[in-house]
Image (cartoon, helix red, strand yellow):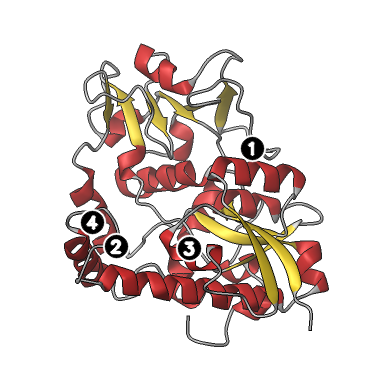
Amino acid sequence: MSKLNMTLACWNYDRTRAIQDGSVKPDGIDINYLDLPVEETFFRMARHQEFDASEMSLSSYTVSLHREKPPFIAIPVFPSRFFRHSCIYVNAKSGIREPKDLIGKKIGVPEFQMTAPVWIRGILSDHYGVPVDSVHYYTGGEEEPGRPEKMKLDLPSHIKVTPIGPEQTLAQMLRDGEIDAFHTARKPSTYDGVNVKRLFEDYRPVELDYYRKTKIFPMMHTVAIRRDVYEANRWVAQSLLKAFVEAKRRTYEDLKETAALKSMVPWLVADFEEAQREMGADYWSYGLEPNYTQLETFLRYHFECGLSKRLLKPEELFAPETLESFKI
């Protein structure tokens, strides 16, 4: 019996490598795995729907659900998670010494709808008293000029967002003091710890404290299937979910290995054991139930930023076949 051929665009992660190398095969599917950097994958999927399935910004995907005909349906898989306190950068001369100093400042973001800044804005509002609408946001390319929003946005008037000039970059604007701070996913090239600093330079204990208080390990990306592919073969959602779960299980086994290190991180075993002590055995969980509160928080932040037209529920994000069945 012939299998369904599918393209899957996703970066080269340890937790997806078994799908990439073919050692884990989704039931009934032949995968053509396209190893692409996330910016390219997101742009091509959001703008042109080039792939049958892909890793996708959780925020971009959520924005897409508000279209008259949503083009994608996701499965509760999160290839990227990241604590983002480390990703708030400030100009040393801006006078920003603590989070509340951000109020009234000029803050750069590559795209307003990016997932990382959604989490950052929400965390700053919830935990540090910096309302989303208390600053002016400037959008554009971080290292190269001319980056537009991937998706058309219709933001409320109290959210102030201005595109930067066609020749400007946010990294250089931060270095030159043209913006005061920067919320981003990638460390800017102008970061030197002197003229451009992190708001939280010693960020690991800050992020650990945040986790202990909230039990949130922020998810950045999900896996989206083109809706026409899903509607023609609804079983693919469950097949892909099972494959991602198995690939992640194998990664946990690699991280547990003590005979030899499988990654070039000297204290890998100690870091892995600490992560499990603090966050539980399956700290990189998939599925709806173990991530429900985290998703609720993200969707509230998305709504408060003006990116969602209504407050969505977590179960509205994913294919119904993936909401329950077997233990994730």
Of labels 1 and 4, the one closer to you: 4
What kind of residue is marked 2? Lys
Relative to 179, does residue 319 appear above or below in the rendering? below
Is residue 47 or residue 107 the one in the foreground? 47
- The quadrant holding residue 148 is top right
- Label 3, residues with CA under 10 Å away: few <14, some 14-19, many ≥20: many
Residue 161 lies left or right of residue 320; in this view the side is left
Of labels 2 and 4, the one closer to you: 2
What kind of residue is marked 4? Leu
Which disc, if any, is residue 155? 1
The secondary structure type at the circle numbered 4 is helix
- Whether label 2 touches label 1, CB < 8 Å: no
Which disc, if any, is residue 262? 2
Figure quadrant of the N terminus: bottom right
Of labels 3 and 1, the one closer to you: 3
Q: Which residue is mark 4?
A: 208
- Label 2, residues with CA under 10 Å away: few <14, some 14-19, many ≥20: few
Q: Residue most toward the bottom?
A: 326
- Earlier in the chain: of badge 2 and badge 1, it is 1
Residue 68 in the image, given as x and y percentages of width and height: 81, 54
Of labels 2 and 1, the one closer to you: 2
Relative to 201, does residue 65 appear above or below in the rendering? below
Residue at image coords 34%, 51%: 83
What kind of residue is marked 1? Leu
Residue 264 in the image, given as x and y percentages of width and height: 26, 53
- Earlier in the chain: of badge 4 and badge 3, it is 3
Q: Which residue is mark 3?
A: 17
Q: CA distance from mark 3 to mark 1?
A: 38 Å
Residue 194 in the image, given as x and y percentages of width and height: 21, 21
